[in-house]
Amino acid sequence: MHGHKEWITCLCWEPLHSNGECRSLASSGKDGTVRIWDVLLGHTRLTLSGHTRSVTCVKWGGSGLLYTASQDCTIKVWRSNDGVLCRTLQCHGHWVNVLALNTDYVMRTGAFDPRKGLIQDTSSSNVELQEKAMERYKAARGSEPERMVSGSDDFTLALWLPESDKKPVSRMTGHQQLVNDVRFSPDMRMIASASFDKSIKLWDGRNGKFIGALTRGSEPERMVSGSDDFTLALWVPESDKKPVARMTGHQQLVNDVRFSPDMRTIASASFDKSIKLWDGRNGKFIGALRGHVQAVYQVSWSA
């Protein structure tokens, strides 16, 4: 099938529960267009134009909508039956690289239920397979709206309710380089993101809150300790017996220490009524937060 004027970046099939014939395929291209193909006839049924730069990703939603991401920093929402542009989603400051839907897993598995470990009888009619896929889709989605997450060259992710809202539910920060890939877990409860910063981060699939990081890339694991001697020490415990840095500045014992979610900063709380901030890599002092009139016992970072 030919039609794109430049190379093709992404493909996505129409979900089985939407069409049991499985003959509609969407493609995105560097030419800034999206094409919906009839694969049996081998021709373009619709051409979607509106992006001003390369389209990086296309996703077919479960309710008849098509989602496209582009290097023009936007995400567009289209009606797949007639190609009408419904809305444009904007929040990223650089290329949007990838999209994922919380219903991706159930749409990808279609009429097959992995929990039962049984393959549906493929001799069933297209209508029967479509009905089974629809049953599974409705059970997975429930009464909740479909959610979408986007990953960008601006180092951030955004969580959307793309069927209805133009503004993101959450903007997720923490990666130190561009985001390459994003995926919802099969149960839709978590989002995993992969980045050029060599880390995988986990986020809450409903509100986008940071959960944790799976890897640290090529960097050694660091540990910080706080003591009654008023000091902190930064360690590389896997390899070294001596601390990377000994951090002085508190005037009384240190009660609590925490790395920030992006691992770049350490916060320490002390009986001297202050919170101090330190560089997470070398332990250098950054600054102090003052305002408490009594001892500070604990600190915690927001996600």
Image: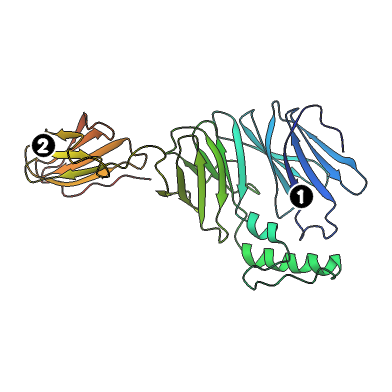
At a point 46% along the width and 50% down the height, the residue shown is: 203
- Residue 250's label in the rendered image is 2
Residue at horizontal 78%, vertical 58%? 18
- Mark before the other along the chain sequence, 1 or 2: 1
Q: Quickly name the residue at label 1.
A: 13
Q: Residue furthest right?
A: 41
Q: Do we see residue 142 in this rendering?
A: no
Which one is nearer the viewer's eye here, 235 or 159? Answer: 235
Q: Quadrant of residue 102?
A: bottom right
- In x, y percent, where is residue 142? 62, 65
Query: Which residue is more in the foreground, 155 or 181?
Result: 181
The amino acid type, in three-letter code, at marker 2 is His
Q: Quadrant of the N terminus?
A: top right
Describe residue 206's horizontal placement relative to residue 283 as left or right. right
Left/right placement of residue 141 relative to residue 179 reads: right
- Label 1 environment density (alpha carbons within 10 Å; few <14, some 14–19, many ≥20): some
Element type at mark 2: loop
Location of residue 63 (image quadrant): bottom right
Which sits in the foreground, 209 or 237? 237
Quarter of the image holding residue 227?
top left
